[in-house]
Amino acid sequence: MNDKEIENLIKAETKRQNETINLIPSENFVSRDVLEALGSVFTNKYAEGYSKMRYYGGNEFVDKLEILTKERSLRAFGLKEEDWGVNVQPYSGSPANLAIYVALVSLGEKIMGLQLDMGGHLTHGHKVSFTSKAWISTPYTLNKETEELDYEDIRRLAVENKPKIIVAGYTAYPKIIDFEKFRKICDEVGAYLMVDMSHFAGLVAGGVYPSPFSAKGGQAIADVVMTTAHKTLRGPRAGVIFAKRKYVSGIRYQVSGGENLEKGEVDLGKLIDKAVFPGLQGGPHANQIAAIGVAMEEAAQPEFKDYAKQIIMNAKTLADELKNFGFRLVAGGTETHLILVDVVPKGISGAEASDQLEKNGIIVNKNTIPYDARKPMDPSGIRMGTPALTTRGMKEGEMKQVAKLIADVLLDKKGVVSEVRSLCAKFPLDYK
């Protein structure tokens, strides 16, 4: 690389990633194939529009690429094209969520998602997000005693507020979501069920987390499903939206251009497509679509199921070991890839814990816990997860070591940099 300043930063970041224990649950390490696709010549091409309906010439291979990536995305989750539309153009998760609202909810109508400080996401209707300015946010919370979803209370709020869309799927919730209960609530109040599976999409693809697409009997659950590709799916930073092809309801549908469709059978996939382009975006990032395609093909392989299972086993082992060291875990533990730890009982704040761990090469993020009395920039908790360490090949034995390293830093105030680097050296990343 001729630009040595940037080259040196890339080398420094590669070294940092190799020598640290990455426990951030929303991060992962992509394969070299994903990296190669992301850095390919597809980055040179402008491809505004959809396959075979572009506004620029020279898109023969972009068309084939987008079609292939959509086919692979459906296959990764066991879906059929006649049942589900899929859009692989969203630049990331936040604009993908915005596109769903634009497609399905008229401006000024109500949306309902989990409150941010309970584990929800900014784009699920938080007050500082545009989503609460364009739509009325009527958030739900967790049960204060169990720190878990209270479906009866969610139903009560939904009946009271009559939202047009209810969001299930979170950024800091360690338990499994009961999608069928959400489906019943949505049917009762006439709302769309939107699932944001960004965090656990890889677990769904791997068969270790319930599918938001269909129940065991085959009946569809969610109306629209959004995922990012860069968490447990182990792909690039990007958004993907799946939507029902056939949806029957008595409500009206607003398309991003202002067009209204009367009640009856509606293809939600087409509404989503219009909201993404031309509603919110211009030309898609073809190189990003190529990388999504690679990641989806990897997620469809038999070995990915083993990977997903190991993520869960690692998370449960790490959680159990942290409890053995006396840490309080939100909701009592984890059923997924994610762990939320309340560190205040140990005389430390979330920000302090995150900083101390990072100085020793252990990367987590500070995070609010349900009903947190502290401020978001210095909350009571830290959030951690096991996707990235599992990608490196670490298993239950290493999780026990990681738990001890965390305890050494936070409880005994020990320096563990050398131990962290020694552990990481046994599981090197395939990057140069």
Image (cartoon, helix red, strand yellow):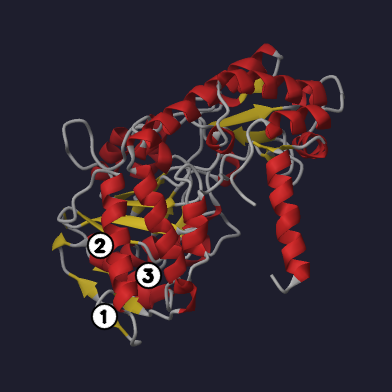
- The kind of residue tagged 3 is Val
- Compared across the picture, whether 46 is left or right of 330 comes to left
Give neighbour class at mark 2: few <14, some 14-19, many 20+ (Cα, 10 Å): many
Q: Quadrant of the N terminus?
A: bottom right
User: On screen, 9 above or below 354?
Assistant: below
Residue at 54% from the left image edge and 27% from the top image edge: 147
Sequence-wise, the earlier of marks 2 and 3 is 2
Q: Residue furthest left?
A: 264
Sequence-wise, the earlier of marks 2 and 1 is 1
Residue 375 position within the rendered picture, expressed as x and y whole percent measured from the top left? 74, 43
SS at badge 3: helix
Q: Which mark is on residue 81?
A: none
**Looking at the rendering, which quadrant does residue 345 occupy?**
top right
Residue 52 position within the rendered picture, expressed as x and y whole percent measured from the top left? 24, 78
Residue 181 position within the rendered picture, expressed as x and y whole percent measured from the top left? 31, 33
How many labels, in total? 3
Give neighbour class at mark 1: few <14, some 14-19, many 20+ (Cα, 10 Å): few
Q: Which mark is on residue 269?
A: 2
SS at badge 1: strand
- The kind of residue tagged 2 is Gly
Q: Which mark is on residue 276?
A: 3
Residue annotated with mark 1 = 53
Q: Nearer the viewer, mark 1 or mark 3?
A: 1
- The kind of residue tagged 1 is Met
- Compared across the picture, whether 44 is left or right of 109 comes to right
Q: Residue furthest top?
A: 324
**Looking at the rendering, which quadrant does residue 401 occupy?**
top right
- Compared across the picture, whether 251 is left or right of 15 comes to left
